[in-house]
Image: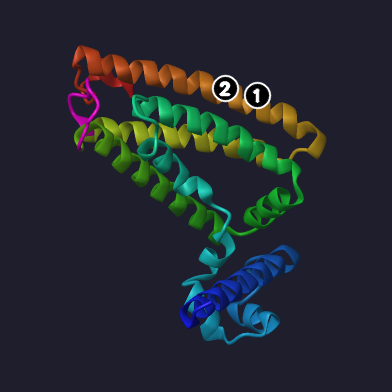
Amino acid sequence: MSEQSRRAQKKALTRAHVRETAQRLFAEHGFDTVTIADVAATADVAVQTVFNHFATKEELYWSGRAPWVSAPEAAVRERPAGVPALRALREHLAGAIGDHVEGLATPEGRRVVSVLGSSPGLQAAERELVHECEGRVRAALLEAWTGPGAESPRPVRPAVTAGLVAATWVATTRVLATGPRDPLPAPEDVPALAAAARELAARLLTRFEVDVTEQFVTGEDPVRPGALRAC
């Protein structure tokens, strides 16, 4: 192993150790009461070492816990040839909702929800991550409709339609994914809740997909009142 590889490995191990230590402390004592200094002392590293890996305490909490921020974008950008962007997005989101709810039966999933529910700061950070997810989806859809090898037909106003789809679909899936966690269900009740969330998501997003696709064909402008249903 080269010296550069050893340094990279050591850096990755340190990052993982700091993250695991912090997330254990957050679970045991609450996010708001634990300081970066507490994390550094418990992990036996310098405070600056923590900041070298994580810019904020919120980032430290969410590290490794928010694949849903980039996964919808990836579902669009990495879809198989011939698969429409909206179908790829719909199939991914419907499955991801069920998987998220199923996680509420696991100790880690329940820990995440418990700590999150006790911290307004973390809840604000989660909303920022949702906003980031929306922006990523919007950009991916716009690329699918206007970039190299763009789909045809496409919306009359691709940028507007991409923004509307990203905002409404991400908001819908967020409600369906987070609804079952307040109150936190008993583990034995989670499978039924996950199945119901997955089924409802598939039904709603399929309807959304049909409406938006009809707008492609009819050429309706999505910002005109007669076309609002397509959003």
Residue at the bottom extreme?
Answer: 46
Q: In terms of depth relative to the viewer, which is nearer, 62 or 20?
A: 20
The location of residue 18, given as percent across then percent down, is 62, 74
Density class for disc 2 (Cα within 10 Å; few <14, some 14-19, many ≥20) is some
Q: In terms of depth relative to the viewer, which is nearer, 61 or 29?
A: 61
Q: Main secondary structure of the magenta part?
A: loop
Report the disc number at residue 196.
1
Q: Is residue 117 above or below residue 182?
A: below
Image quadrant in which you'd find residue 142: top left
The residue identified by callout 2 is: 200
The answer to whether residue 72 is visible is yes
Residue at x 55%, y 54% (from the top left corner): 123
Q: Is residue 104 above or below residue 46?
A: above
The answer to whether residue 229 is visible is no
Residue at x 22%, y 26% (from the top left corner): 223
The location of residue 221, given as percent across then percent down, is 19, 21
Residue at x 65%, y 24% (from the top left corner): 196
Is 149 inside the magenta-drawn segment? yes
The residue range painted magenta reads: 148-158
Q: In terms of depth relative to the viewer, which is nearer, 2 or 157?
A: 2
Q: CA distance from mark 1 to mark 2?
A: 6 Å
Q: Secondary structure at mark 1?
A: helix
Which quarter of the rendered picture does the N terminus lie within?
bottom right
Residue at x 27%, y 34% (from the top left corner): 144
Report the disc number at residue 61.
none
Q: Are marks 1 and 2 in contact (CB under 8 Å)?
A: yes
Residue at the front extreme?
Answer: 1
Q: Amino acid at mark 1?
A: Ala
Q: Is residue 114 left or right of residue 98?
A: right
